[in-house]
Structure formats: C-alpha cells, structure tokens
Image: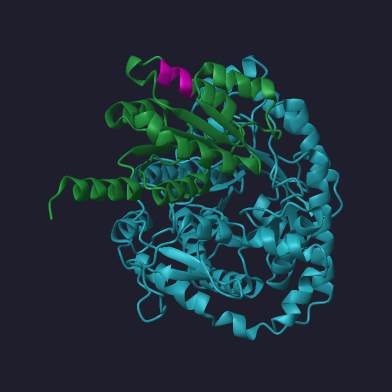
Amino acid sequence: MNSPVETNALDRRDTAAKRDATVIVSGVSSDSHTWNLVFLQLLLEELGYEVVNLGSCVPEELTVAECITRRPALLVVSSVNGHGYQDGMRLISRLRERGALSDMPVVIGGKLGISGAQSSDQLAVLIEAGFDAVFDDGAEGIASFQRLLDSLPQRVLA
Amino acid sequence: MTGFGEFVRDAGELVVQPRMGMSEPDRMRAGLLATKAAAGTTVGTITLDSYTRVGDLDSAELALMEDVPLNGYPIVSHELATTRQVLDGIQSEDFPIQVRHGSAAPQDIFVALMTAGLDATEGGPVSYCLPYGRIPIAESLRNWSRSCELFARLRDIGRKPHLETFGGCMLGQLCPPSQLVAISVLEALFFYQYGLRSISVSYAQQTNLRQDIEAVYALRRLCDELLPDTDWHVVIYAYMGVYPTSPEGAYQLLGQAATLAATTGSERLIVKTVAESVRIPTIAENVSALEYAAATAARVRRDRKADLTGAVNSQTYAEAEALVSAVLNLGTDIGQGLALAFQHGYLDIPYCLHPDNNGRTRTYLDAAGRLCWADTGKLPLTGLVAARGARTVTSSELLESLSYVRRKFDSQAITPSPAHAELEARGA
C-alpha cells in the first residue's frame, strides 16, 4: 500500500490539481475598476493558484508590503482607466528598489493609456523599468497571458 | 437663479448630458461649448481625473507641471482663476454644469467646486466608496455627511445646490436592479438628512429593457413615498458595462437607453459614445451621442402608447422596497443604518471586492437577459426570491455575462431594428 511509487504518483496528482503557489492580483493606485480583477482571480484560481486579490485603488506601499509578506509566485497588475502606464512605472520602481522583490515575476496588462493602444516604445519602457511582461489591450492579451502562466510554475518554483 | 434641479425638471423634454473631462483648460472649455451648442436640451459636465478622485493631489499637480494629459479635469489643482476662465460665459441659467468625480473623501472637491461658483455634483457615501477602493464605509459616511452639510449651506445664500446619487450604478453591471434602486433611494435619503432639497436619483441601464422599466417605476414610487418637499428627478445612465464595438451596436444600445428614459418619464440621460469600447471619447463623438439620444427620446415620447400599469407593482419594486425598509428599520440615522446594513449583509453587492462588503451574493442572466439572483446571501429577501442556491461562477461564465450586452447588440447590428421595437415586442 505504501510503496514509494504510489506515494509519488499521489504527489504528482496533487501537484497537478493545485500549484501550491500564491499569485497576487492588484489594481493600481488611481484605478477604481474591479471587473478585470474579479476575472483574473477566477481565471488564476481555475488554474490552481491561491489568489490574493488586493482590489482596486491599491496604494503602492500596500502592494509592496503584501508582496514582501506573501512572497507570491507572480504579481499581476491590471489597469483599465488610462493611467496604467504612469501608475505602473511608479509601482515597478517601488517594487524593484526592494532587494527582496528584485527577482519576483511582475506582469502588467489592460488599457494602459488614455488613447487606445500604447506605442511599442512605451511598452518597451515598461519592460525596461522591470516588468517581466506587458499585455496591452487586445484579443491576443488573454491567450498570451495564459501561455505565460503555463510556463510560470517551473520557472518560479525551480 | 434657476438651479440644476429646476432646470432639468422644467425642461419639458429629456435633458441629455455627456461624461466629459479634460485636463487642459482650453479643451475643457471647448468641450463645454460643444455640449451647449449640441441639438437638444443639454447640461454640461466636468468630470475630474482619477488622481483628484483618490486624493493624490501631488500626482495631479505633477502631471499639470509636466504637461501629461490626465483622464479628467483636476479641479482642486488648477488655479481658481483658470477654472473661472473655463466657465466664463458658458455656465448660465439655461446651461447648468455638473461636476462628476467618484471620491469617498470629497471635501476638497466640494470646496473647490463651490468656490468656483458651481452648485451641482454627484456621488454618495456607498456608491463612491464600495466599488472604488479601500476607504472603509464608516469613513466614507463621515466624509460624505460633512460634505453634504457644507454643500447644503449654499441654500443659506439663496443658491440651490443639487446632488445626484450614483447608487443606481453600483459596479456598472451584474447588480440586480432592485438593489440598484434601493441604494439610489437610500443615498437620496442620506442627502436629505444632511439638508439637501434638490436631488436626482440615478439608475443605470442593465440587460433587459422590460426589467429596467420596472426598476425606474420602482425608483419613482419609492421617491414619491419617501422624499417629502424635495425637488427630485430621475437620471438614467446609458449602459456602463462592456460596450458594443460596432458603431451600429453602440447606437442601438444608446437608443434603448433613451427609450427607457422617455418611456418612464425620466428627466435626464447620461450618454455613452461609439468610442466607449476602446477609449475616452472625443468631443465630436460626445456631441453625436447627445444629439442621437435627444432625437430618439423625442421620437419615443411622441409615439408613446405603451401600457405600463404592470410595471408599477413589479417584483423589482417588491425587492427594492424590502431592502430599503430593512435598512430604515436599523435606526433613525440613515448613515448608521447603511453601515449596519453592510455589516449584516442586508445590502451586499455581487462581486464587489471592498473589505466592508459581505461578498456572499451572486447573479446570473436568465434566458431573456433579466438579471437574477443566483445567491442572495443574507439579503432580507426571503419569501420574495427563489434563488437558485449557491453555485460557483467560472471565469468564462463571468466573461460571458459581462459581455452579454456587447454580443447582443453587436450581432443585432447586422440586422438593424429600432430599439423600441423590442419594447413593443415584449408587451411593455
């Protein structure tokens, strides 16, 4: 009954059902929208993650403090009010200046500017500032976000 | 001087209003002028930016210094002289202007708008708190009571301050109409308690026209019953959720909002534009939306022949009345009643992430697109609602519900039909 093979098989099944990793979902300081955050929470939970949803209008200090306490496998920042570029730039510098969070995977997505899609220059600036990926508004967004999630646990938990 | 409330009530036709706010004073002024010049009876809007809304005035000021455009007009950070210049010659007896913001700590905003000579704004201690961030509801109630008292003092100098509830728009979508009506009424009673006597009550178009008509009748009936000696009117919001992407679909949805307003005798309508699904609209797009909505409402009003007696004694009214009564029974102070109601779960907004919201209620759309309770949590609706019982909503189901209206109106756009044809087909 308790042979090592069976135990390992059981462990693998558990791992598949539950990724044993926490993802923090957060809005940015000036953005009041929440449907994006509710959707991301449900999606991430279905993929087996524990989700801590910080909700909307999150002050930068709170996002930083929660990341330091919880050490998430990923921080997902979502914004749709048009201030995402500015707020995102500020948040990422606050996160990356903390040594403990310098390697934490952080992604941002949504409608990041007030006039439709952002220029590729601005997307590059967000990456340069420390985001691991940027998902600008568009049909491709969710699919590429899911691809990133699929690749994530191995990278993070290795 | 005629106040905002009187102007709207006496207009004799549906008053249409944009959502509009630009950080550059010249563009803000151009937007107000274009609104004033649009065909139809219009009122002006100054929507504030998100930094001002959350009280992050440093960021608003920095943006002004660096010429970074914001998503609205930073009324607290601009010089008073600048704001006066924006309004100069535009604000008048026949063109009142409303300030729109979204703040749970609005004291600075009230001071700024009153100093600039403005006397109409909107919000509420619940509707500008729960959907919008992290400020505890008790704190929002304190902030709003002080702001209302301050605002009501304009009456002492012969002005007629007007305040609109945003409670009929909670989260924009997927909140059943009865609870929208209840919160709108309760916020109006809160404003009344703090001295305001010119009030509008909001209701945002949802997913089913017949259900929306019931909701607006319920709202009117409750205001008739509960708001004595008050100049009040109803303001309809064109759909606030995921918007159709096709111009035809967007116009049909706006047309249905105008139909809802005209059919129910609502006095004012806040429009949405064809650009809604992608970005903040231009001035020209706003003007087109205003003119389209005004023309549609005028046509529906002329053709009005619907028998709506059934809509007055509706399920929506019964639920809304039960929710309002439950809160009023919690005490004589309406603010305290609201705080306790959220603690007990007598009010509970589906999918709202605020820490003070119970978060036990869930909703679904039935086959006709009516918004129904999937789980009533601890709402005092026992005996009124046969909820389906708690069930999990998946991310794809949520997306499907959130985008129901977009799908419906984008697919209808291929075979256009006038919005009010549906109303007649449903026997309204």
Shade of chain B as shown in the rendered figure = cyan
Residue sitting at x 35%, y 77%:
B382
Residue sitting at x 63%, y 85%:
B309
Question: How far across and how far down the image is residue B3, in percent?
Answer: 67, 50
The range drawn in magenta is A91-96
Residue B125 seen in the current view:
no
Residue sitting farthest toward the left: A2
| B359 left or right, relative to B417 | left
Chain painted in green in the figure: A
Image position of B200 with respect to A34: above or below:
below
Question: How far across and how far down the image is residue A116, in percent?
Answer: 70, 35
Toward the viewer: B223 or B60?
B60
Toward the viewer: B386 or B93?
B386
Residue B25, picture quadrant = top right
Name the dominant secondary structure of the magenta segment. helix
What is the number of callouts on the image? 0
| B13 left or right, relative to A3 | right
In the picture, which quadrant includes the C terminus of chain A?
A: top left
Q: How did the renderer colour the structure? A: by chain
Question: How far across and how far down the image is residue A149, in percent?
Answer: 46, 39
> Is residue B116 found inside the magenta-colored segment of the image?
no
Question: How far across and how far down the image is residue B239, in percent?
Answer: 65, 57
In the picture, which quadrant includes the N terminus of chain A?
A: bottom left
Image position of B19 with respect to A65: above or below:
below
Toward the viewer: B240 or A133?
A133
| B65 left or right, relative to B137 | right
